[in-house]
Image: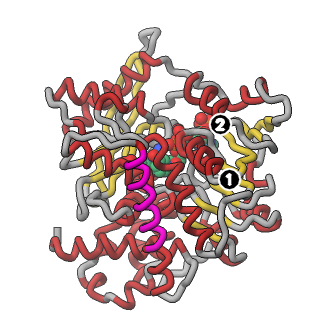
Amino acid sequence: MTTRLDDKLNLIYQDVLHRNPGETEFHQAVLEVLETLGPVVGKYPEFADKKIIQRICEPERQIIFRVPWQDDNGEIHINRAFRVEFNSALGPYKGGMRFHPSVYLGIVKFLGFEQIFKNALTGLPIGGGKGGSDFNPKGRSDDEIMRFCQSLMTELYRHIGENTDVPAGDIGVGSREIGYLFGQYKRITNRYESGVLTGKGLGWGGSRARTEATGYGVVFFTEEVLKTRNDSLDGKTLVVSGSGNVATYAIEKAHEKGAKVIACSDSGGIIIHERGIDLELLKQIKQKERRRISAYTEYHKDARYVENGDIWSIPCDIAMPCATQNELNGKDAKTLIENGCIAVIEGANMPSTPEAIQLLQEANLIYAPGKAANAGGVATSGLEMQQNAIRDSWSFDYTERRLEEIMVDIHRNCYETAAEFGCEHNYMLGANIAGFLRVADAMTALGVI
Ligand code: NDP
Ligand code: 2IT
């Protein structure tokens, strides 16, 4: 891929490559932002004088530690865990923890970097950070998960706090893991500090609608996008990749809005159900039984399971990648375009490759980047922190309404910023610039720190 960087931004990018060798996902996330900042550098030369972009690209703090734990047979395992505290100009570091065997520093840094701009877009007082471990939770018992979480927190606790750094969930980390992490934090510190983690259970400081928030938020964002074209979700056909937290609640809200989701997936294969995905069954298989998505066809004979299937080859009006990074490549983008898809709205973080994004934009499809479209999760984490701070607990309806307002605001901000910089409908440019400006203003005000 040739870059579209001017000389100044290219120097910054070359420096990032040099300082962070081998971290390809981080390079990709940085390039994606730098490629849209050209007009900002021209308009606000003071940011260059203050080296704001160079400072944003360098994490404030990076913590790497060993996590030893024993499995049910007494065998000892050693994992590696990370917490990258990227930027705290707007508030305490905030971002999830990912448990997946593919996790290494480059993944955590790409996620932490994107989180800075995403969190800025929410308008809430939260900085950007991310963490995770190369621990593979698949096939592990509840006790093993608990021991792993306890061991991880035995180191992590000294780096986090409600005013310092507030982790949450991501791939492989849901309310079960947050429970074990919170329990160990409480035990070690002897403090019931609810605001130290978000995504907690409803009975012990969690927020209503946090579980649903990311997926619901993606759909609220999609509605706003369609409204700008006098269109709606009603009657649309959707394909949603993944079948975890984000995918499940994106499907739920899309169905509520009159759309039909005809396919979803996990890392083993895809389910195609032309009548529409049976969400209650999906929840039963994935959340309660923690089984593979292939089990779906045991219940619905008219559904098809395709092992290692290509989800983006299924014709749809709207594609929502909700699984993982780089899951939608140039070839997939071409197929979607040929099949008449009108929009790609990202529920996952950086699911589209740079080549895919370029092709989608050139073909005038609507492309909404994750850092805007999936910001509802972290926004509702922000609402959870608010409730914890005042020791309150809001109703589902109220919290969902707040989430929807935030998503409408994020959409408007991205849309108007893109128009202001002469690139109407370019949500990627709008999101990057709007997020960047909020962080850059705060960093400028706080001085060289
Ligand atoms: P979950 O662990 O709940 O679900 C992840 C889903 O994606 C599973 O179906 C999983 O399949 C699939 N998947 C994960 N890794 C891969 C891979 N390498 N290849 C193929 N499929 C994969 O995670 P979430 O739903 O929470 O997260 C999904 C995406 O959304 C991630 O990009 C995450 O960063 C992002 N996100 C999450 C938010 C949240 O609040 N949870 C907020 C904003 C963004 P399998 O089970 O087979 O591994
Ligand atoms: O990518 C994300 O925004 C998340 N995984 C949610 C982070 C959070 O702190 O709620």
Is the C terminus in the top left, top right, bottom left or bottom right quadrant?
Answer: bottom left
Of residues 265 and 412, which is closer to you in this image? Answer: 412
Q: Residue at x 74, y 49 (%)?
A: 311
Q: Is residue 195 visible?
A: no
Residue 102 location, x and y as percent? 52, 41
Residue 402 included in the magenta stretch of the image: yes
User: How many residues crowd mark 1 within 10 Å: few (<14), some (14–19), many (20+)?
Assistant: some
Residue 246 location, x and y as percent? 54, 45
Q: Residue at x 61, y 26 (%)?
A: 284
Q: In which quarter of the image is residue 30?
A: bottom left
Q: In this view, does 108 lie to the left or right of 138?
A: left
Is the N terminus in the top left, top right, bottom left or bottom right quadrant?
Answer: bottom right
Residue 289 included in the magenta stretch of the image: no
Q: Residue at x 69, y 53 (%)?
A: 259
- The residue furthest top is 73
Residue 340 location, x and y as percent? 79, 66
Residue 82 location, x and y as percent? 35, 43
Q: Find out if the beta carbon at label 1 lies less than 8 Å from the nearest ligand 1 atom.
A: no
Of residues 10 and 219, which is closer to you in this image? Answer: 219
Residue on which disc 2 sits: 279
Q: Do the residues labelled 2 and 1 touch (CB within 8 Å)?
A: no
Considering only vertical position in the picture, is 181 above or below 126? above
Q: Find out if the beta carbon at label 2 lies less than 8 Å from the nearest ligand 1 atom.
A: no
- The residue furthest right is 302
User: How many residues crowd mark 2 within 10 Å: few (<14), some (14–19), many (20+)?
Assistant: some
Residue on which disc 1 sits: 258
Q: Residue at x 74, y 40 (%)?
A: 270
The number of numbered badges drawn on the structure is 2
Chosen colour scheme: secondary structure
Q: What stretch is highlighted in magenta?
A: 397-412
Q: What element carries label 2?
A: helix
